[in-house]
Image (tube, rainbow, N blue to C red):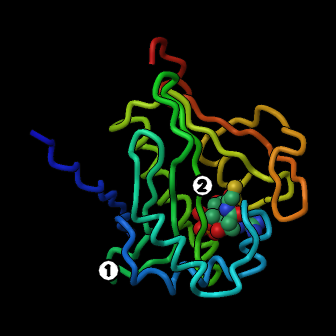
């Protein structure tokens, strides 16, 4: 007998509700993916056509929980999508995953990423039992580096020509947070 699929976890914070994407979120995500400033350090070029964001949202609905999952970041009061957070590159044996995030340019610097990414990290260490969460961040991405540092991530070094976007090679800074960092160095996590 096949098992019933596990529902997409909903993560709640004071102001936000992180839920599964649906096709109606396309317009909101296109506001993010078509904005050159928001996309300056992203891992693919700016979307010039809404169909590109429609395809992206279709991929975000899908998930393989041991490897990746995407959440629409919504305002709890309105259910309106104002960004996306995800984990990806899950590695079961090493209990490790990487994270990504983007917030609607009109809603940045309101503490939304801090609230949303904190909730997803709690889910990663708590419900998923991960040991290491990492973030790969462009050296000039001041907003993302500040966010990671505020969340307790440590910078472990610079990866040269780590990413190819269009015709350009890009460096990444490797940031990581361990379950033991959060528990003050407790062993065996
Ligand atoms: C990175 C990003 C998600 C932050 O979202 P946000 O909701 O604006 O972040 P918050 O409001 O929670 O701010 C978190 C911290 O970063 C700081 N910060 C935000 N934007 C900043 C900027 N442009 N420059 C410097 N610091 C910035 C905030 O001041 C805050 O630190 P503080 O409390 O010490 O003041 C957002 O800038 C974004 O979507 N960027 C484009 C996509 C991207 O680059 N994603 C990361 C790929 S690795």
Q: Residue furthest top?
A: 187
Kind of element beneath mark 1? loop
Q: Position of residue 171 (x, y in %)?
A: 87, 48
Quadrant position of the C terminus in the picture: top left
Camera-side residue of 159 and 131: 159
Quadrant position of the N terminus in the picture: top left
Kind of element beneath mark 2? strand
Q: Is mark 2 within 8 Å of ligand 1?
A: yes
Camera-side residue of 8 and 168: 168
Residue wearing tag 1: 77
Q: Tell me if label 1 and label 2 are in contact, CB under 8 Å.
A: no
| Image quadrant where residue 140 sits | bottom right
41 left or right of 54? Answer: right
Q: Residue furthest front?
A: 1
- Of pointers 1 and 2, the one earlier in the residue sequence: 1
Q: Position of residue 166 (x, y in %)?
A: 83, 65
| Image quadrant where residue 129 sits | top left
Q: Position of residue 84 (x, y in %)?
A: 51, 66
Q: Position of residue 127 (x, y in %)?
A: 33, 38
* Rendered position, 52 above or below 152: below
Q: Residues within 10 Å of mark 1 (few under 14, many from 20)?
A: few
Q: Nearer the viewer, mark 1 or mark 2?
A: 2
Camera-side residue of 37 and 94: 94
Camera-side residue of 65 and 86: 65
Query: Tag on residue 100?
Result: 2
Q: Which quadrant contains ligand 1?
A: bottom right
Q: Residues within 10 Å of mark 2 (few under 14, many from 20)?
A: some
| Image quadrant where residue 164 sits | bottom right
Which residue occupies 51% across, 87% down? 27
Marks 1 and 2, how far apart in space?
24 Å
């Amino acid at each position: 007998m096949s098992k019933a699929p596990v529902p997409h976890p909903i993560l709640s914070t004071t102001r936000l509700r992180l839920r599964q994407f649906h096709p109606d979120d396309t317009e909101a995500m296109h506001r993010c993916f078509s904005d050159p400033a928001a996309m300056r350090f992203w891992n693919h070029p700016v979307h010039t056509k809404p169909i590109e964001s429609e395809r992206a949202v279709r991929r975000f609905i899908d998930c393989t929980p041991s490897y990746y999952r995407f959440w629409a970041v919504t305002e709890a009061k309105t259910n309106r999508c104002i960004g996306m957070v995800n984990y990806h590159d899950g590695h079961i044996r090493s209990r490790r995953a990487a994270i990504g995030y983007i917030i609607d340019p009109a809603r940045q610097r309101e503490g939304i990423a801090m609230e949303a990414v904190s909730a997803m990290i709690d889910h990663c260490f708590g419900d998923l039992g991960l040991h290491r969460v990492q973030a790969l961040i462009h050296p000039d991405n001041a907003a993302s580096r500040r966010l990671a540092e505020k969340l307790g991530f440590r910078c472990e070094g610079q990866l040269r020509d780590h990413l190819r976007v269009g015709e350009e090679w890009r460096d990444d800074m490797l940031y990581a947070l361990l379950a033991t960092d959060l528990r003050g160095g407790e062993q065996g996590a």
